[in-house]
Image (spheres, helix red, strand yellow):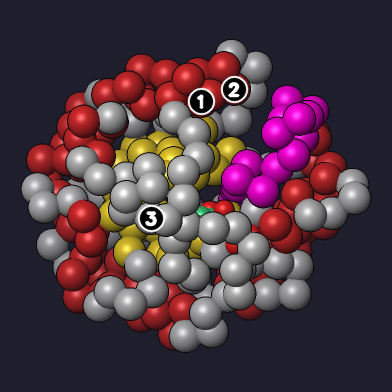
């Protein structure tokens, strides 16, 4: 079952609740929550307080993508606030095993994230203790960037690496995914498609969610 995860980074925050509701009604599966600290990435977004208030109203699992320095310091706060999935970057998590165990021990799904310029071989060991891998298809920090085409080759290679260890590990892909490439990305082996500007940039967020979800589902019919 392939899943659609709207990234609220590109939402209209004036009407955030309405927009998340439109995603839920349109058939989204997960809400993707981009946490940036202005250090690991050159942008600042939001923290556990916002996640906690979304959790009170949103029936979908919340996926916290942590683009922050010293993620261990904040992981408990995000999980207590209601994060169901938490991912940390391989590039800035020195004690990856300990960090992923912390996430799992607190009851959330643990993921490792990898940037476009980082060799996939760095994931080799982590695949033995993650629930999901998040493959970045843009450099993290901003919504609305162009999909890096080489990500498709990396996705296929990652799929093979994952399947050799544990085929139940989910692969999530994030960055530059739109209605014109989502089908290709799903067919190349991703399980969870994150979409920000390609969803919230539409006039009708609910209709766009349904359109993207149907494209994803059509990839499974083949
Ligand atoms: C980038 C974030 C993404 C971003 C995706 O650092 O991790 O989740 O919101 O936005 P789009 O789909 O517009 O590339
Ligand atoms: Zn993200």
Query: Vertically, is 204 above or below 212?
Result: above
Q: Is residue 23 in the magenta section? A: no
**Percent of width and height locating residue 180:** 75, 74
Name the residue at 76% across, 30% down: 14
**Percent of width and height locating residue 58:** 64, 23
Name the residue at 20% across, 41% down: 70
Residue tagged by mark 2? Answer: 54
Query: Vertically, is 87 above or below 161?
Result: above
Name the residue at 41% across, 65% down: 135
Assign the C terminus to one quadrant of the image: bottom right
Secondary structure at badge 3 equals loop
Task: Between residue 147 and residue 126, name the one nearer to us.
Answer: 147
Residue tagged by mark 1? Answer: 51
Residue range highlighted in magenta: 3-19
**Percent of width and height locating residue 218:** 73, 65
Could you give the CA–CA distance between mark 1 and mark 3, rounded to whole angstroms? 20 Å
Label 3 beta carbon within 8 A of ligand 1:
yes
Which comes sooner in the sequence, label 3 or label 2?
3
Task: Between residue 99 and residue 211, name the one nearer to us.
Answer: 99
So how many labels did they put on this image?
Answer: 3
Q: Nearer the viewer, mark 1 or mark 3?
A: 3
Could you give the CA–CA distance between mark 3 and mark 2, rounded to whole angstroms? 24 Å
């Amino acid at each position: 079952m392939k899943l659609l995860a709207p990234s609220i980074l590109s939402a209209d925050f004036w009407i955030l609740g309405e927009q998340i509701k439109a995603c839920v009604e349109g058939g989204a599966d997960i809400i993707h929550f981009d946490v940036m600290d202005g250090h690991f990435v050159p942008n600042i977004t939001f923290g556990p307080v916002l996640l906690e208030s979304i959790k009170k109203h949103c029936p979908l699992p919340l996926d916290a993508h942590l683009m922050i320095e010293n993620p261990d310091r904040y992981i408990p706060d995000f999980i207590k606030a209601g994060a169901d999935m938490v991912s940390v970057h391989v590039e800035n998590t020195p004690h990856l095993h300990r960090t992923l165990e912390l996430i799992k021990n607190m009851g959330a799904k643990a993921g490792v994230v990898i940037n476009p310029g980082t060799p996939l071989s760095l994931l080799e060991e982590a695949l033995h203790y993650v629930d999901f891998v998040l493959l970045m298809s843009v450099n993290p920090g901003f919504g609305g960037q162009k999909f890096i085409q080489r990500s498709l080759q990396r996705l296929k290679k990652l799929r093979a690496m994952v399947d050799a260890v544990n085929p139940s590990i989910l692969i999530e892909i994030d960055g530059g995914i739109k209605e014109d490439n989502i089908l290709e990305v799903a067919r190349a082996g991703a399980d969870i498609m994150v979409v920000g500007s390609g969803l919230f940039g539409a006039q009708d967020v609910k209709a766009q969610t349904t359109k993207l979800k149907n494209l994803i589902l059509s990839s499974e019919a083949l």
